[in-house]
Amino acid sequence: MYKTILFSLVLFLTIVHTNSNPPATDVFEALRYVCKGKFQGGLCPYAIAYDIATQLAGNWHDRDGATGLWSDGGPAIWWPSGVGLWAFAEFFNTMGGRATDKLYLATRWAAIETAKKQNNYVHTKFTDDQAWWANGALRLEQYIRSIGDATQELINAAQAVINDNVAHETEECGGGLYWYYGKSPPSTTDKTTISNVLTIYTMATMYSFTHDPTLLQGGAHGGAIDIYNWLVSTDLLNNQTGYQRDTLDTANGQCQLRGGVII
């Protein structure tokens, strides 16, 4: 019996150690093998990617996922958090299990801890920043599920963002989400391409998890397809050329396009 207890204790300590420590230095040895001599300073993309990933991990605010990923120390988790999670998910996919277990577990833990603090990424009043976070969380969840694991926290976090963003979609100028819904300044009359496109992406990705048809079309505020159709109808997005305009200003009901054409 004591052997069973001892084994359980060792297993527990191993899990705690794995989840709390930074990536092991022997990752570099593994990468040297993968790169077959073309290592850092040479031509190995795996080593470069790992360098970037570990720098990102080292910049977690106070090294505490509960405070937030890559925040400025304030209460809000801005768009870098979402982009960072997205980048990690792509890194894990590309590495295909090459000595990334500890980095994966640390990222998964920090993402979940951040997801528990909804006021850090929902109600920031910037719908594009919120959608960046939601997309990063969902992309990481896709990777997590691809290896046979799953979380509910990241799904819940992304859904909270969707709910908040679409609550600020109005019929002013035919539809679309506002970029910012706090007190002016900045502008509270702008409906931007980036906020709407990122929300479309969030809703479409969430559909792959839940298969809720209202995420695509219909629903209380419209779905991803409805928002896309609005973008095209306003000429914020030209679906023939792919050109985009930056902003539709709804001030005084004028519905004026602003910002140069983006290719």
Image (cartoon, grey):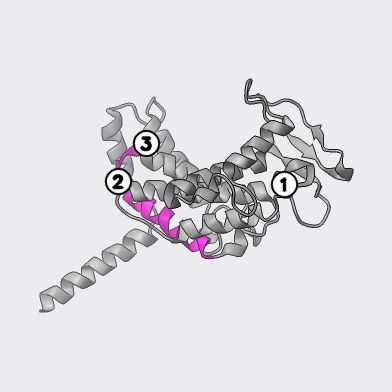
**Residue lying furthest front:** 218
- Is 34 on the left-hand or right-hand side of 172? left
Q: Residues within 10 Å of mark 3 (few under 14, many from 20)?
A: few
Q: Choose the circle earlier in sequence order: 3 or 1.
A: 3
For residue 230, which numbered disc appears in the image?
A: none
Q: Amino acid at mark 3?
A: Thr
Q: Secondary structure at mark 1?
A: loop
Residue 125 location (% of width, % of height):
70, 55
Q: Choose the circle earlier in sequence order: 2 or 3.
A: 2
Q: Amino acid at mark 1?
A: Trp
Residue 10 location (% of width, % of height):
22, 68
- Is 146 on the left-hand or right-hand side of 114? left
User: Alpha-carbon distance for marks 2 and 3?
Assistant: 19 Å
User: Alpha-carbon distance for marks 1 and 2?
Assistant: 45 Å
Asked whether the viewer can see residue 122, the reply is yes
Q: Residue at x 64, y 36 (%)?
A: 229
From the image, state whether disc 2 or disc 3 is nearer to you. 3
Magenta segment includes 245: no
- Quadrant for residue 164, please give it: bottom right
Please state the extent of the stretch shown in magenta in the rendering.
94-116
**Which residue is tagged 2?**
26
- Quadrant for residue 236, please give it: top right
Q: Is residue 98 above or below residue 105?
A: above
- Is 180 on the left-hand or right-hand side of 108? right
Q: Residues within 10 Å of mark 1 (few under 14, many from 20)?
A: many
**Which residue is tagged 1?**
179
For residue 94, which numbered disc appears in the image?
A: 3
- For this rendering, which residue is in front, 80 or 138? 138
